[in-house]
Amino acid sequence: MITFEEVKNSPVIKTYIEKADESLLALGYTEHSYPHVTKVALTAGHLLTTMGYSQREAELAQIAGFLHDIGNVINRIDHAQSGAVMAFRLLDNMAASPEDTATIITAIGNHDEGTAFPVNPVAAALILADKSDVRRSRVRNPDIATFDIHDRVNFSAVRSDLKIKDERTVVELNLEIDTNVCSVVDYFEIFLNRMILCRKAAERINLTFRLIINDQKLL
């Protein structure tokens, strides 16, 4: 069986992650390299483990999390779908089983806001892990005056915690934001579509999604 360690240590996969992030840097996007994909992978696996899913399902979520953004090496547009096709080829070359490959590429192909849907628990965990990764350190634009919405969302985040709470019935994203960068109301408006997606993803793994910003419950 294909393992997370094999995927994480593959020189070929590392190259695609690095080149994909180079493209996003040129386009002015936030960081999508090893810090992001590793955090997403570990968070996705932790979510499923905590909710009682099998160790194998958790590992597939880790693999999907590590690979989910490689499609950016082709183009930012439709990167989820192109990434799923790339992942299929990579996993096939690594002799992954059809069942494991299908689960992983389905999750990757369904993680981006425009076309995303939590079609299975692995996809649900990937969505929650990806959309909750907001950090000031992801911002690479040094000019606050030219920030886009992704820069504002990430740069304003002083603290971000995603935790399963209340006896495994609630998954809560608790954010502390700098309102000098982005007001709570503006932040919620910018963040709304991805938070609606997180709510659907949480429901897929029998959780209620809760969003807290600066101690205010917004969802």
Image: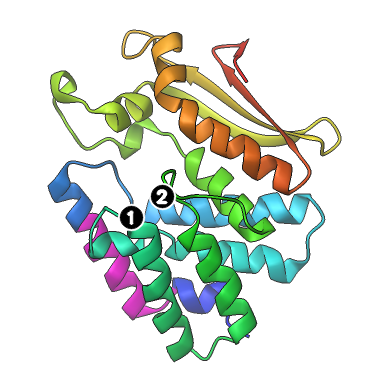
Q: Position of residue 125 (x, y in %)?
A: 62, 51
At 53% from the left and 57% from the top, the residue drawn is 41
Does residue 20 belong to the magenta stretch?
yes
What's the magenta region?
9-22
Whether pointer 1 and pointer 2 mark residues with C-beta atoms closer than 8 Å, the reply is yes
Q: Assign the N terminus to one quadrant of the image.
A: bottom right
Badge 2 element = helix
Does residue 42 belong to the magenta stretch?
no
Q: Position of residue 5 (x, y in %)?
A: 53, 74
Q: How many neighbours does mark 1 have within 10 angstroms: few (below 14), some (14-19), or many (20 or more)?
A: many
In the picture, the disc for residue 36 is 2
Q: Is residue 78 above or below residue 96?
A: above
Q: Position of residue 175 (x, y in %)?
A: 53, 23
* Of the pair 26 and 114, the residue shown nearer to us: 114
Q: Is residue 107 above or below residue 9?
A: above
Is residue 3 visible to us here? no
The amino acid marked with disc number 2 is: His
Q: Which residue is mark 1?
A: 33
